[in-house]
Image (cartoon, rainbow, N blue to C red):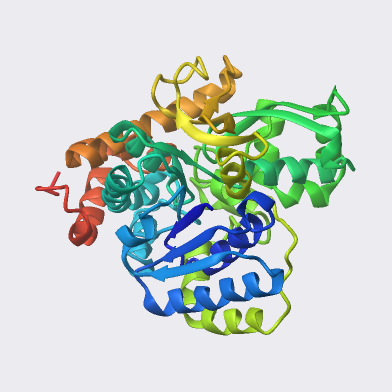
Amino acid sequence: MAKITFIGAGSFGFTRGLVRDILTFLLLQDSTISLMDIDAERLEFIKIAVEKIIEEGKYPAKLEVTMDRRKALKGADAVICTILAGGVNIWRYDIEIPKKYGVDICVGDTRGPAGIFRALRTIPVMLDICKDIEEICPDAIFLNYTNPMSMLCRAMQKKTKLKVTGLCHSVQGTAEMLAKWIGANMDQITYVCAGINHQAWFIEYKKDGVDAYPLIKKVILENEEIYKEEIVRNEMFLALGYYVTESSGHNSEYNWWFRKRQDLIEKYCLPGTGWNPGEYAYILKEYLKREDTWKDEIKKWLEKPVDLKRGHEYAAYIINAYLGGEPYVFNGNVPNENIITNLPYGACVEVPVLVNKRGFNYIHVGEIPPQCAALNNINTAVEEMAVEGALTGNPEMVYHAICYDPLTASVLSLREIRQMVNEMFEKNKDYLPQFKNIKI
């Protein structure tokens, strides 16, 4: 009987969906589901939801609910992490301070100045969780869904020996979107996707064994609605020749091309497209709104019958494979041990991984196209410096990382970046115990 532990279980929508998926596997139906969070109110809501899923599915699963992380980890075979270190009221400054300096961010949870400061707050917490896992359940697999994915995974993989990987739905989500655009079913599609989190590339995308890129290009050029649906990513595809994962909102932040001038934002970052890239701090506004409405939304969900159909998140399939079920291939965030040969050794890359009872088996990719590797290498260099700064408590290294962030560098001078970073350090100082000095 497996034990599956959720750290940050109060992430209601995610935990609810993943528990539903886990219990659809015969091997996992009698699992102990352990829910842990530091927010007692959210924990109570997710407890009621999971009880509802177990009851309506008539599953023999057991439920454990606790605010004690070490208790939740005892006997765990798999640990799933979805935490937010610091909360929205500190995260908001990651977006609002750069905006004051002209760096216009709409999501800010993955890279750039906002993603880096989120990493600085979150890495110490993640390493504490890893330390507990190493002591209490060292054979468990650790599946991270918390952003910034690459930087957190890089820090954990650098400092621990755990079986840890980071998971994101953007690979399968993009693959399904492209299939829909060309009128294909997913059982007709095969692909190879590799790069870094939120910026991995479909270096191969085939329909019925034939390159589907000509079909994708045709529909983007001929269908204005589809072109505008993902205008930033579509522009990148038309220029670079390979389709990139994640939404247009995210991707508009990771390069020099779309957000450095207001006229470009108005032209390419259209409201209503992927993650509303035209609206400053879209995701922040959404989270602030949810702070007022989340209880009502959960109560409405609890009043309806549960849809017990399995979804497409990787974690349930991975856990099933690791515990003896059918082996499974997914795209995970792992150390680059010569998997992608034109990205830095050791850096966190998002590549195909086979999971079975042995654990995670990385699949060799080789070189990715140079125009794709160029953008990945810039962002990887930023992430490497940011992680080094976080692990050593060196604020100057954090400054250097932000100096090379493509969006920041397209807008600000070096002195302006230094001033912005100092202001961000000042706001975050209570959340950064690893830094003895925050003045740069």
Considering depth in this image, is 259 or 110 the residue closer to the camera?
110
Considering depth in this image, is 124 or 47 the residue closer to the camera?
47
What residue appears at the point 33 percent right and 47 percent down from the top-left corner?
133
Left or right: where does residue 162 sit relative to residue 313?
left
Left or right: where does residue 391 sit relative to residue 350?
left
Q: Position of residue 101 (x, y in %)?
A: 34, 54
Q: Position of residue 102 (x, y in %)?
A: 39, 53
Please say if 118 is above or below 164: below
Q: In which quarter of the image is residue 179?
A: top right
The answer to whether residue 281 of the structure is visible from this angle is no
Q: Where is residue 187 in the image (x, y as percent from the top left)?
A: 84, 38
Please say if 413 is above or below 425: above
The answer to whether residue 181 of the structure is visible from this angle is yes
Please say if 404 is above or below 395: above
Number of callouts in the render? 0
Q: In which quarter of the image is residue 91?
A: bottom left
Q: Position of residue 389 (x, y in %)?
A: 23, 38
Considering depth in this image, is 407 or 352 the residue closer to the camera?
352
* Image quarter (top left, top right, bottom left or bottom right) of the C terminus: top left
Please say if 311 is above or below 185: below
The residue positioned farthest toward the left in the image shown: 436
What residue appears at the point 46 percent right and 78 percent down from the top-left corner?
44
What residue appears at the point 61 percent right and 49 percent down from the top-left corner?
316
